[in-house]
Image (cartoon, helix red, strand yellow):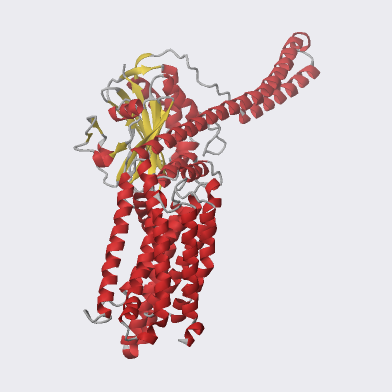
Amino acid sequence: MGSLALNISFLTYGVATIAYAILLGLIVQKNQYKGEHRWLGAAVVISIVWSLFNCVSAVAGAYTTNMLFLTVSYLLPVVDWLKGIAWIIFLFNHLRDIWNSQNNQRLSRSVGGMITILATVGFIIEMIQFASMWGVFERGIIGALPNYSKFAIAFFILLLVENLYRNIAHENRWGVRFFCLGLGSIYAFEFLLYSDSILYSLIDPELYEARGAVNIIVVPLLAIAISRGAKWSVGISLSRQAALHVVSLVAGISYLIGISVLGYYIQSFGGEWGKILQVSFLFAAFIGFIVIIYSGKIRSTILVILNKYFFMYKFDYREEWLRFIQTMTDFEDHYNLHERAIKAVANLLDSPGGALWYRDQPDRFQLAARWNFRKDIDEDLKANNELARLMETSHWIVDLDDVEEGKIPKVDCAVPKWLADEPDLWLIVPLIHHNELKGFIVLYHPRAGKELNWETLDILKTVSLQIASYLVEQETLKALGIASEFEAFNRKFAFVIHDIKNMASQLSLLNKNAEKHGDNPEFQKDLKITVNNTVEKMNDLLSRINLIQEPSQATEVELLDVAKILKSRVDRFIKAGQAVELVSDNSVEAISHEDNLDTVFVHVIQNAVDASKNGQMVHVSLTQDQNYAIVKVTDEGEGMDRDFIRNELFRPFRSLKEGGYGIGAYESRQLIHNMGGRMEVKSKPGEGTVVTVYLKKE
């Protein structure tokens, strides 16, 4: 008995028992053992019992024949497990009150179910272990399962405590700071203890005996929190990023512990090949670990599980909005605005990619951009399509998984076949600006399952409105840029007019003096020099500028025979020795303006001829459907890439031709628009270009 005073374990756990007893007295004094605080008192009471049992266990060796001491010693692991469960229930109890007050009983039930499973499985393990100590079962029948159970409890408590501190309202952190530090420190030590025991298949006795000292150090921190009257249930919300980091950290540690244990057994039972097999296994496992770390799908799956079971709302709106704004305004990103818009929405839903259709033409939506979009889709959607009208009038976000037989069930709206038949496509998100559909984004299915509930729909509608305003603003800036370029062009031309005026004045003066001095040889000599200089100046001006007038919006149109006008223009190219071939219906009438239409045909066919090399044939065809006369001009030249067509082709002063002004394409499309038609360009580098002009028949 005299040696008890020298028993470090007995002393530390004894002092810990006294410390927890004092903490319980403080709880009673502060009246924090009733109502929502009852589980705090219960956890502290169980901690007192746990410390007391450890004291008894420290001296149990001296009384091996005493039934009381043996029972206490055998019950110690059960009380150890019960202490952890009590702290988990304490934390969950306050979170459950918050969730229930916010009508989120589903989340409360889900987390409660997880705790019930954890407690039930742990209780069964502890009871089997307790029974095996009395000889009911063979000792060691469940192996290291008790250590795994306590390892899981330590992880669960660390997760809840860490999130409690990070996400509680700032004004309440003063009251809980030391509580989080204290309880977190205890179970961080427990986590280290049981991870070490799992790795080496036994508990380090020195670490185990140090728990008493750890609790002595930590209890004063808990007492400070209790004395400050911590508000446990106010302002708590779990951080997704913190939860993800903690889960990833613990999962990574568990993975490394697991492969270390397996590597140990491989070496033990591998004989002479054991070392080689162990090294090979550990290397392969390490490579697998790196792959897992960088796996977007695994990260997405973890986030989905965390959002589903631990959070009332699916999105951390502050973080999501900041990320959205950063993506949309990231000018250093090599993506253009349309691609950044796709990326912003895809990141929000964890989708791997998508595409954006935009209303460049007055009557249809064309593919404007792709981001990680692997499908070879280049279809257009007419502006008067019933799907476009549905999205415009009701801001409907289309879930393609709900489409049945090509229609949206609730509204009986048909979805184009090229969208409905693609199994990888998931959502169609409309981009609305001032109640007008400007475009839509099509997304792939997310990497992990996503529930399309009211919260997802609301945030999609919010970001889509913002994206639409960005895109419209960009179009406005482009229009202003074009107007500015024309203004600069006109300013330059004003100086040219001034030079022409001066030359006209000189010629007029010569003409006037010619009547008086026409027979004078000196005058004739000066006349010749002046005329030559004037011609040189005019030729120089003509070589540097072309007078291009922006197409008028007030052009009068009428029903004309397009076939006749097109044939006349093609014949002139053929007579000039150009390789142009025409395939045309006999008579096709459409609403147009003869001079303007001739200007368009000249530009389109001449561009095709210029792009063709070595006498390659340019094919011109005229067909018609119910609504349009359709003129196609096809060449087999160098072609253009999608970005140039989208961003440069129809902007003035942008040209791939050497010495070209880049005004013809802009002028031609404007003339066609003024006639109520549209112009489309399809091209691929190295494969040629197809320009299609649609003219309304009535």
Q: Is residue 516 left or right of residue 191?
A: right
Q: Residue at x 30, y 62 (%)?
A: 119
Q: Position of residue 475 (x, y in %)?
A: 50, 30
Query: From the image, which quarter does the N terminus lie in?
Result: bottom left
Query: From the image, which quarter does the C terminus lie in?
Result: top left
Of residues 72 and 363, the one drawn nearer to the viewer in this rendering: 72
Of residues 453 and 536, the one drawn nearer to the viewer in this rendering: 453
Vertical comparison of 38 with 329: above or below: below
Asked whether residue 608 appears in the rendered view, the answer is no
Q: Position of residue 65 (x, y in %)?
A: 32, 86
Tell how many labels: 0
Vertical comparison of 584 with 269: above or below: above
Asked which quadrant contains residue 145, the reply is: bottom left
Of residues 85 and 545, the one drawn nearer to the viewer in this rendering: 85
Asked whether residue 586 appears in the rendered view, the answer is yes
Q: Residue at x 71, y 16 (%)?
A: 507
Asked which quadrant contains residue 590, the reply is: top left
Q: Position of residue 179 (x, y in %)?
A: 50, 58
Identify the residue at the far bottom of this view.
Answer: 272
Q: Is residue 183 left or right of residue 145?
A: right
Identify the residue at the far left of this view.
Answer: 405
Vertical comparison of 681 with 306: above or below: above
Of residues 414 and 545, the one drawn nearer to the viewer in this rendering: 414
